[in-house]
Image (cartoon, rainbow, N blue to C red):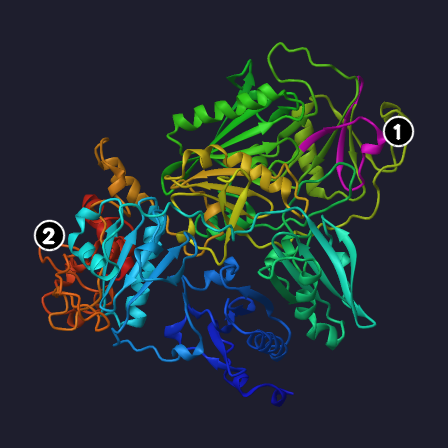
Amino acid sequence: MKDDFPDTFRNISRKAGLQIWTINNMKMVSVPTKAFGNFFEGDCYIVLNVAQSIDVHYWIGNSSSQDEQGAAAIYVTQLDEYLGGSPVQYREVQGYESPQFRSYFKSGIIYKTGGVSSGFTHVDTNSYNILRLMHVKGKKHVTAKEVEVSWNSFNNGDIFLLDTGKLIVQWNGPQSNRTEKLKAVLLAQDIRDRERGGRAQIGVVEGSNERESPELMKIMTTVLGEKPNKLKDAIPDEKHDQMQTNSVRLYHVFENGGNLVVQEVATQPLTQDLLLSSDCFIVDHKGSSVMVWKGKRASKVERQEAMNRALGYIKAKNYPPSTGVEVMSEGGESAMFKHLFKSWTEKGQTKGLGSTHTVGKIAKVDQVKFDVMELHAHPELAAQQRMVDDASGDVTVWRIENLELVEVDPKTLGQFYGGDCYLVLYTYLRSNQKQYILYMWQGRHATQDEIAACAYQAVTVDSKYNGAPVQVRVVMGKEPRHFLAIFKGKFIIFEGGTGRAGAANPESSTRLFQVRGTNEMNTKATEVPARASSLNSNDVFLLKTDRVCYLWYGKGCSGDERVMAKTTSDVLFRQDKQVVMEGQEPANFWVALGGKSSYASDKRLQKEELIHSPRLFECSNQTGRFRMTEVYDFAQSDLDEDDVMLLDTWEELFLWIGKHANKSETTDAWKSAQEYLRSHPAGRDPDTPIISIKQGNEPPTFTGWFDAWDPLKWKVSLIADLSNSPNRDLSNAGIGGDGYRAPGGPMSSPPPYRTHGFEISPKSPTIPKAKIPPFFTSVESGKYLDPKLLVNKEASELPEGVDPSQREEYLSDVDFESLLGTNRADFQRLPKWRQNDLKKKAGLF
């Protein structure tokens, strides 16, 4: 069968990594690694990414021919079959690429004019015969498009790279932000290293302060002509980012007599059982993408025609040609696809640790034991178990009374009333430093004023601890695991009333409590209506009457559950308990419940933990509607200090607030998270716990979702900030301002750290030579080196004259901050041991 495939497929590697081909004369031609990220507008490309899953993208340039597009689609179908049908296929259109596709190119994507004839197959690292202007856009994922080399192409809001061969000038629009500037300089560095062999230099001009860069401005005006008095206003970014929509529909698409038939099957929320292995289906995530699901037993023709049917569907629906398309096989579904379904389980998956149970429904969760002492050593375990520690910290509880905080009597700790709101402050130690979690528990019958006062008082408590507490909204009945654990098996919810001193609660002669849990970490008692229909054969119930207290054991409850129910019942009622086994109830038991009636008594069911990969989003509501940009293959470095980020782990929602996030985004963060849950196409529980985290105060339940989390990444900046005077101008601490310079590459003449004058590309022979100002002057040498000459090098391998113990002194400002995670001035304020620790991690020691 392998002989039926193109010869090119024989060279495909199944090792993790990226492989790219272009379509040349209707054939797949491999693209060299040095050209990755460069896409000619007249071509089509096939991109294969092998990681934990296999993804195949085919990219369509705006100027590519229909023949090339058709050939690319055919090759993708063949490639899918060659790889066993496991890849997820994506159709990408220039300018509308999916976040996942853009995430492959960390330095950005460059759109080049022309096509295969432009000679992309050879990257000449010694060629300086270049003159081009690139328009750079984007914060998370950068794209650069070649535009007319003229001031007419500029605007005040974006960044432009003037590439003259030996020099790349980055011009930052006055309205561009620090993140965009940093991303642009990384793109400039990538061009320098890959296309010029590291031999070009990079200069930066701040459009708001051009007088500070006279030499670079002289070069720009020589190439572009005199700058006009006024440039165009900032151009709003095109809204390529997907706006979440809850309009999701499932269709069965098939041919009948040569005609394409589209038959609607269901609307959201979708359930997994609607997908039949014998058929192919389309999920229309309207306004976002079209996804094709191929059942394992679908015919070969149906599977091969999946992409064409998706395109035919898009055309029939009059959707724009840029609409994203995903094609996947049963068992190889993408994370985004699974998130559109109310529930998703995999065959043979393990059972979960716990979940909210609805009274009267049968459900059981196998309890997985774990060593709580390993939670800090293994944050990924803490994240999976939703436990920051073993719940042995200090607990303080306040109740909202007359809109103020009143501390709860320690004797009644763990007893919560549905008519109240509470603040619970949990304090624990991590690395001998105090950490805080502030839970905001909202009773089902609390007034809106009390709920608002609870949020207001949370801000007050948060301020008292300098913003350190992690804030968690908890809705009655939806308590997260750690919240239950801190009350040591004595967490009790009274349906109504209030716990206020002297308050007259409506007393009932009969009260019924459902007790669930197998140990101190997961047990709670919840008051339910005192009637027989509330019983459940899988649980223990406590029935209190005027004369007696019954402890009712359902047939399906375990010995551990009975022990914990006995402990909880001792908290509620002091009198002796009469044990009643299901099926042996005395007549008075049924009388107290208003008579015998049917209740949930089926065989114990096992509830599987939903399989959903965590997803990270950059949140924005600047347009007046909630929008989010997904960050694929996310890492700690994707947490942007200027933004509010949303991490969805399905069971919990984390809001991470960067220290430079604007006030509007920070204020609206909670509202945005609630809107995200409300509008989620899978019909998510709107009471899912929402956890607010400030940068630098991340608990292990958050950091565990990230690989190789560095707990000191922001601590360094915090120490430096505290060391500075209160009048320090922070605008110059990062990108922008006088302190910002970009690095150049290694020089061609020894010694390698010498700064040379600049000579323009041969393409512009009339431009005079100009001296480039130094990009960085260190305290001692006045010279800088490319990081490649310093990092992870033995002393004997370093350039002549470099002090092995002070190699950070030969780095430019941008390289210094990139490698060490802090700027030069803040680094000097750190103790020596901490400096050495950072240098070791950066390979500079």
Name the foreground residue: 619 vs 310.
Answer: 310
Quarter of the rendering occupied by the C terminus: bottom left
In this rendering, would 251 be left or right of 779? right
Mark 2 highlights which residue?
779
Q: Residue at x 67, y 58 (%)?
A: 318
Compare residues 342 and 508 and report the one nearer the observer. Answer: 342
Which numbered disc, 2 or 1, marks the residue closer to the eye? Answer: 2
Identify the image quadrant of residue 530: top right
Residue nearer the viewer, 159 or 687: 159
Give percent across and percent down for residue 141: 43, 56
Q: Residues within 10 Å of mark 1 (few under 14, many from 20)?
A: few
Residue at image point 55% right, 33% down:
473
Q: Are marks 2 and 1 in contact (CB under 8 Å)?
A: no
Residue bounds of the magenta highlight: 525-548
Q: Residue at x 66, y 46 (%)?
A: 246
On the rendered structure, is 114 left or right of 830? right
The quadrant holding residue 166 is: bottom left
Q: Position of residue 173 (x, y in %)?
A: 32, 48
- Of helix, strand and loop, which one carries label 1? loop
Question: Is residue 594 visible to us here?
Answer: yes
Answer with mark 2 or mark 1, whichever residue precedes in sequence.
1
The answer, for residue 348, to whether it is visible in the render is no
Q: Identify the residue at the far bottom of this view.
A: 3
Q: Amino acid at mark 1?
A: Pro
The amino acid sitting under disc 2 is Val
**Residue that numbered label 1 is attached to:** 586
